[in-house]
Amino acid sequence: MLVCDGVTGVALRTLKDHIGRVYAVKFAGDVLATGSADGTVRLWDPVSGECRHRLDVHPAGVWPVSLGPGGTLLATGDAEGTVTLWDTAAGRLLRTLPGHAAPAYTAVFSPDGSRLVTGDRAGAVRVWSTASGRLEAELPGHRGAVYRAAFSPDGTVLATGDGGVDGGEGGTVRLWDLARLRLRHSLTGHGGRVYTLAFHPGGDLLASGDTEGRIRLWNPLDGTAAGRLEGCTGAVYQVAFDADGTRLAAGDSDGTVRVWRVGPGVRGTGREVAPLRRQPP
């Protein structure tokens, strides 16, 4: 795994300790966390490249990995539905969160770190208190595997995306009111599984991407469609806004990263800035 300079793209160092495929990489504060098919999570110093802690977490392999604000808390999940919470400074297990009967596909902390949301292959979504480990709510309604969850910047809205029904309709995005723990809107229009979600830094726009290369934009306040971004030729695995919300990047299965301008005046359709294609080895 490479650690690169975010401005120049130059590789700074290589992290080599995992002996299996690395499925998850998360960065928060001064902590870099990686999860692998070898069943371990490693916590790194991103500056020196030192491995601070090796966590032998899930024999079946680590799937979702999430870091809380500042990188003080770590959540992990596995193919057996086990979700764990860790203190990253000490590398110490805080608690195991029971309840998922299917593989855990996603885990995400609220912006203030007080809640953890997890989703699984059976469509279950659970909201946990990170302080006590108490299950606060189960959010029903997904008919397919929940691949991604995302909090709005102010933590009041949760978006969850699923894979739809095999042989049926595409994936659905659901928006939840977290104060009342109830459904606000159900968003349809994707033809494939929804693999990725991202809120605009201002909280007034949500992007979702699917396995058919579609990226859709939504108004999370009223649940209306705000547009779509064209150009991806493979399954969209990741979307992300930049810090000031003027650009959106998407990575797809053909090895290309595309960047669109989505600021005022072009929001709704967007204008592709440049495709960044993987270079051959």
Image (cartoon, rainbow, N blue to C red):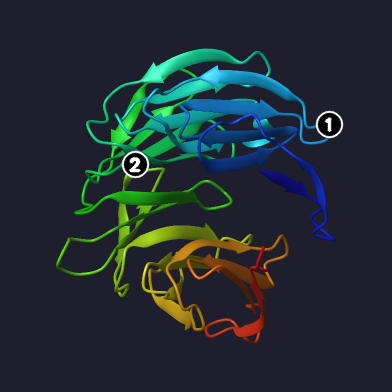
Identify the residue position indicated by label 1 in the image: 48
The type of residue carrying mark 2 is Gly
Left or right of 257, for residue 5: right
Question: Residue 279 bears which disc, if any?
Answer: none
User: What residue do we see at 51% from left, 25% from top?
Assistant: 40
User: Whole-percent x and y of residue 95?
Assistant: 44, 15
Q: Using the image as rendered, state which of residue 224 and residue 59 is in the foreground.
A: 59
Q: Using the image as rendered, state which of residue 55 and residue 98 is in the foreground.
A: 55
- Residue 60 appears anywhere in the view: yes
Tag 1 or tag 2, which sits nearer the N-term?
1
Quarter of the figure that contains the C terminus: bottom right
The type of residue carrying mark 1 is Ser
User: Whole-percent x and y of residue 55?
Assistant: 55, 19
Question: Residue 119 bears which disc, if any?
Answer: 2
User: Whole-percent x and y of residue 243?
Assistant: 71, 60
Q: Using the image as rendered, state which of residue 38 and residue 233 is in the foreground.
A: 38
What is the residue that sits farthest to the left in this orientation?
167
Q: Quadrant of residue 194?
A: bottom left
User: Whole-percent x and y of residue 215?
Assistant: 46, 74
Quarter of the figure that contains the N terminus: top right
Name the element at disc 2: strand
